[in-house]
């Protein structure tokens, strides 16, 4: 999928921010419902914001470019993402699947990449798609 055709799969858009800036994100003990106010009159609750990003990162066909684009957009916000958003973006297995697909008919590339990444994968406790039997799904 080329970048030109990825307009449909761009990160979820957020309405423009208010000119007055953003307010700090309340902690889990906050008793009030937090709402994001935007200059275009749109309102997005914290839950809607989180759900939008979880949905984006959980797309089954997300590719490496979309993942990078989404992460760059997300870290550009004045907030620390909720753990559920990070959890949705975290699975490195997707990255390994993308590398395997990108290698295509050159079957020697993917095993080489896994071999070179093995110490890091082991250190972080990350399984390959093959170890999780995802290559059989």
Image: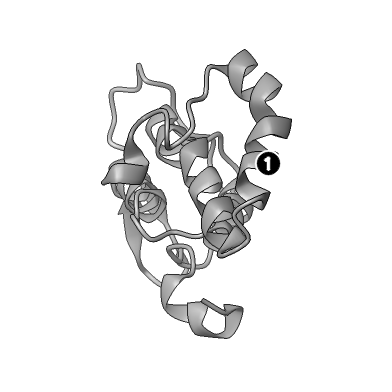
User: What residue occupies the far right of the structure in this picture?
Assistant: 116
Question: Residue lying furthest bottom in this view?
Answer: 4
Say which of 95 and 50 sits in front.
Answer: 95
Among the 4 quarters of the image, the one containing residue 73: bottom right
Q: How is the image coloured?
A: one colour
* Residue 96 visible from this viewpoint: yes
Depicted 132 relative to depicted 53: above or below: above
Classify 115 as above or below 120: below
Residue positioned 26% across, 46% down in the render:
137
Q: Residue 102, located in which quarter of the rendered image?
A: bottom right
Please tell me how many numbered marks the rendered image carries: 1
User: Which residue is identified by label 1?
Assistant: 113
From the viewer's perspective, is 51 left or right of 78? left
Is residue 117 positioned above or below 120 on the image? below
Tell me the element at label 1: helix
Q: Residue 64: x, y in percent?
A: 57, 57
Image coords of residue 124 (percent x, y): 59, 18
Query: 135 or 79: nearer the eye?
Result: 135
The residue depicted at 54 percent of the width and 46 percent of the height is: 95
How packed is label 1: few (under 14 Cα within 10 Å), some, or many (20 or more)? few
For residue 19, say whether it is visible.
no
Q: Position of residue 93 (x, y in %)?
A: 48, 39
Point 54% across, 44% down: residue: 96
* 24 sits left or right of 8 in the view: right
Q: Position of residue 114 (x, y in %)?
A: 63, 35
- In percent of the image, x 57 and y 85: which residue is there? 4
């Amino acid at each position: 999928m080329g970048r030109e055709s990825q307009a449909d799969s761009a990160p979820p858009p957020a309405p423009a921010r208010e000119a007055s800036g953003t307010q700090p994100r309340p902690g889990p003990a906050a008793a009030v419902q937090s709402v994001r106010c935007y200059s275009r009159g749109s309102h997005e609750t914290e839950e809607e914001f989180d759900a939008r990003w979880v949905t984006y990162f959980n797309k089954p066909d997300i590719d490496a470019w979309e993942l990078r684009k989404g992460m760059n957009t997300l870290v550009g916000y004045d907030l620390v993402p909720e753990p559920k958003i990070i959890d949705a973006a975290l699975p490195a297995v997707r990255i390994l699947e993308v590398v395997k697909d990108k290698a295509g008919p050159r079957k020697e590339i993917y095993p080489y990449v896994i071999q070179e990444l093995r110490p890091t994968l082991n250190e972080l406790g990350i399984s390959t798609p093959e170890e999780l039997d995802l290559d059989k799904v």
